[in-house]
Image: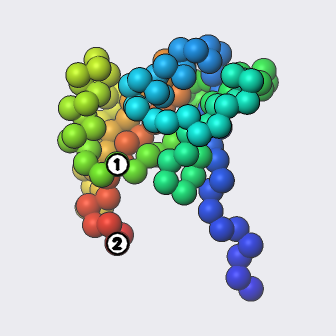
Amino acid sequence: MKTQFEDVAFVVYPVSDMARARAFYADVLELQETSNWENIWVEYDIGHGTLAITNSFPERQPGAKGALLGIEVKDLDAVAALLAKKGIAWSSGPFDTPVCRGASIKDPEGNELILHQRKNKNA
């Protein structure tokens, strides 16, 4: 039987300060908002998936014990240079494996983002 699951629809990061989080994703990562519901749920489409940030789940806390998002990048070195110009340092890494390179940064809420570059796009 073929699976009924097709793709990841979205990942949600809880945030406590929406203005600060939105500034990070727009100004630092240069992502475009694709949906905004009353400034309590903001979405950024990335490839086939969506990253949502929200302060509407008080039972969820931002930071290191939350979700983990991996974002595929075209050129890790170019992204590293852009982030360095904006004063953003790696929170861990960089790492190098036989199939990929990557490193992590954290948003202002402490949520981790792995920036990932496949060595072979067919891998």
- Say which of 38 and 41 sits in front: 38
Identify which residue is drawn at 21% across, 32% down: 81
Relative to 48, say whether 1 is above or below: below
**Based on the displayed image, in which of its 4 quarters is residue 30 positioned?**
top left
Question: Could you tell me if residue 110 is visible in this image?
Answer: no
**Based on the displayed image, in which of its 4 quarters is residue 45 positioned?**
top right
Q: Is residue 64 left or right of residue 24?
A: right
The crowd level at tag 1 (other Cα within 10 Å; few <14, some 14-19, many 20+) is some
Q: At numbered mark 1, what does the secondary structure look like: helix, strand or loop?
A: loop
Question: Could you tell me if residue 31 is visible in this image?
Answer: yes
Relative to 42, say whether 46 is above or below: below
x, y percent for residue 99: 30, 62
List the residue tagged with mark 2.
Answer: 122
Image quadrant containing the C terminus: bottom left
Identify which residue is drawn at 59% across, 39% down: 34
Q: Disc 2 and disc 1: Cα gap in Å?
A: 15 Å
Relative to 65, say whether 70 is above or below: below
x, y percent for residue 118: 32, 58
Identify which residue is drawn at 74% across, 85% down: 1
Q: What count of labels does the image hold?
A: 2
The disc, 2 or 1, on the residue closer to the chain's N-terminal end is 1
List the residue tagged with mark 1.
Answer: 73
Q: Is residue 78 left or right of residue 11?
A: left
Q: At numbered mark 2, what does the secondary structure look like: helix, strand or loop?
A: loop
